[in-house]
Image (tube, rainbow, N blue to C red):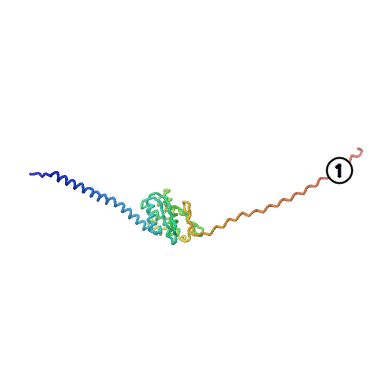
Amino acid sequence: MTSRRFSPALLAAGLAMALAAAPTLAQTGGGATAAAPAAATSHEADRLAREFTALAGSPANAQALVAALRDGSTISLADTAPGATGTATFPPDTGKMGYGDVKIALSLAEASLAKAGITAPTATELEAALNGGRLVMADGSAVDLKGVLAARADGAGWGRIAADMGLKLGDVVRSPKHAGEVAEHGHHAHDKVARVELAHGHDHDAASHAARPEHVGKVDRPQRPDRPERPERPDRPDHPDHAGRPGG
């Protein structure tokens, strides 16, 4: 039986080839593993943005809204109504959220607006639904929005938040707009929203308002007439001297 001997040159060449192939294999395996979560994250964000485009007003608004809620960063939305040029910029009352929480939060916000008859909200109305505020109608009535993110930041669960709004969480997640419309009958019309009072202190006029009449000043009370002076009492006449007793 003969044994085969490998020359040092052949062994060195084989080792060099193995070392050269190792980084390529590691890069291929590692790259595929690392790219999978990023691809899934992007897909989920795009799906949510498409789902809530009508609520946000535009695809760009929807993408910015989903990304900001996911990262806990400042939300910036542009008004998309004809002729509108304003923007709403506000921090969410919550911190970072998972995509599941983002979906629930936006679904509850959409349902709360649908209860008020608003199916295509302005950026400021959406801010009120998320962080809290009041919709003041042209007829003087008002709709209070507690804000789904504000309630969540206070520690309330999603089920409790939905129940406080008179909704069922399952119905809201399946069809937020329909759930809100069914929960409220005879709701307000969107074009009758006159002003939005936001929980963080700044208001937004949705329409021009007539100036309030100035307060009428208090009417001066008429002065009381001076009391007439009492006439002086006449001097009492001197009493006559008593006549002396007879025989005095």
Residue drawn 57% across the image and 56% down it = 214
Of 244 and 40, the residue lying toward us: 40
Residue 200 x/y as whole percent: 46, 51
Residue 126 x/y as whole percent: 43, 56
Q: Residues within 10 Å of mark 1 (few under 14, many from 20)?
A: few
Residue drawn 89% across the image and 41% down it = 243
Residue 131 x/y as whole percent: 44, 52
Q: Amino acid at mark 1?
A: Pro
Of 96 and 104, the residue lying toward us: 96
Query: In this rendering, does residue 183 appear at all?
Result: no
Horizontally, residue 105 falls left or right of residue 18, namely: right
Could you tell me which quadrant the N terminus lies in?
top left
Of 180 and 4, the residue lying toward us: 4
- The residue furthest right is 247
Q: Which residue is mark 1?
A: 240
- The residue furthest left is 1
Horizontally, residue 245 falls left or right of residue 16, namely: right
Horizontally, residue 6 falls left or right of residue 101, namely: left
Query: In this rendering, does residue 20 appear at all?
Result: yes
Residue drawn 8% across the image and 44% down it = 2
Q: How many marks?
A: 1
Residue 226 x/y as whole percent: 71, 51
Could you tell me which quadrant the C terminus lies in?
top right
> Which element carries disc 1, helix, strand or loop?
loop
Would you place residue 236 above or below residue 167 in this image? above
- The residue furthest front is 9
